[in-house]
Image (cartoon, rainbow, N blue to C red):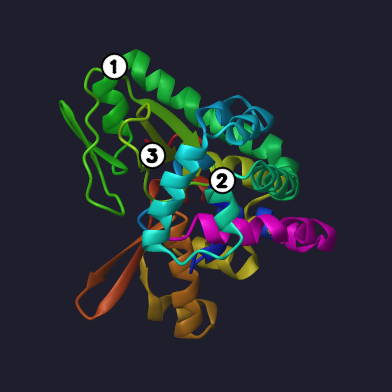
Amino acid sequence: MIFTRFRFRDRVRPLTFRPWFEELHADPARTARMRGGARLLDSLVPTGPFFPDFLTPPEGLLGIERGLAALLGTSRRRLAAELRRLARHHNLPGWVRPLAEGDLGALKELVATLRDYHEAAVAPFHVLITAAVAIDRASRARSMLSGGVDRLFTEMGPLVRWTPPVLQTDYIVDKDLVLGGRGLRLVPSYFCQRAPVTLADPELPPVLIYPIEQRHRWRQAAARRGGLGALMGTNRSAVLHALDRSATTTQLARMLRISPAAASRHTTVLREAGLIETRRDGTAVLHTLTPLGTALLEGSTSDPR
């Protein structure tokens, strides 16, 4: 639920989330029900170096109601400490003060608002989300069973870099998480994008929330929308098909009779979706299909490796 707000802030909205965006905006009652939670999350989960850990209790892995019940049980001391830390990075509205003071009424209102937001923004897509996450989890389990930790982390590249016994990942702040004999729980996330996320407090049980592979999102999103063209739109689908051979932005514009600016916008979105890769070739920018892009054009989202 937390990561959905980050997706609304994306400068380039990923194609695999297109059905989600469009269905939300097509239902005014649903978007109205989201507004309170959206304002709340925009205050408590800003884009930046920190957001409170109490908003993502481990009980949430057992279902939204278990997670909200755990949130409702957050201690006053923890609320005060984490919201005080958040205030050092982000200006907080006045309604946060009763919550930081542990006011039970404010905490109950927070939980009710988050429940409404979840019911509107996430619950209607439960089948799509859980299916994609289940496929990713099964793929990771096969890697672990066949090649142990080495293969698991190697195949999670470039999200992570495994140099035993150190696991590295790009992160918004420079930090070390020392396990000290504790296990590391890997949590696949449908809405997490680009880089893994961990809890801010190193004393909490170690968790690494990572984005599922794009191919698993594509498989479910394309099936829900009824095909690749319906999912990404006619023009963008045409750009992808035109890249069955590498082409520059100018060449794409000429082939498809669109402006270079439009071709550049389309390739930016396709690159963000993991379907093409871009490199500079002299003064030109050359676009090439990735294995995932090739697999989609061939009508398959099976593992391209």
Measured from the top left, where is residue 142 in percent x and y?
41, 19
- Residue 18: percent from the left, percent from the top? 63, 58
Instruction: Say which of marks 2 and 3 sits in front.
Output: 3
What is the C-alpha distance between the residues marked 1 and 2? 27 Å
- Count neighbours of disc 1 (C-alpha within 10 A) and say few if under 14, some if 14 to 19, many if 20 or more: few
Q: Earlier in the sequence, mark 2 or mark 3?
A: 3
Quarter of the image with the N terminus is top right
Give the answer, above or below, for where 45 lies relative to 201. Answer: below
Mark 3 → mark 1, Cα distance in angstroms: 25 Å
Q: Which mark is residue 199?
A: 3
The kind of residue on which mark 3 rests is Leu
Horizontal side of 267 relative to 28 (left or right) equals left
Give neighbour class at mark 2: few <14, some 14-19, many 20+ (Cα, 10 Å). Answer: many
Q: Residue at x 44, y 76 (%)?
A: 264
Q: Earlier in the sequence, mark 1 or mark 2?
A: 1
Please tell me whether residue 208 is drawn above or below residue 251 in the rendered image: above
Q: Secondary structure at mark 2?
A: helix
Alpha carbons under labels 2 and 3: distance apart = 28 Å
Sequence order check: which comes first, mark 3 or mark 1? 1
Residue 202 x, y percent position in the rendering: 30, 35
Q: Disc 2 marks which residue?
A: 218
Q: Say what secondary structure mark 1 lies in.
A: helix
Where is mark 1, residue-wise? 148
Could you classify mark 3 by the number of other residues whose Cα lies within 10 Å: few (under 14), some (14-19), or many (20 or more)? many
Q: Which stretch is magenta?
A: 22-47
Amino acid type at circle 1 is Gly
Quarter in which the C terminus is drawn = top left
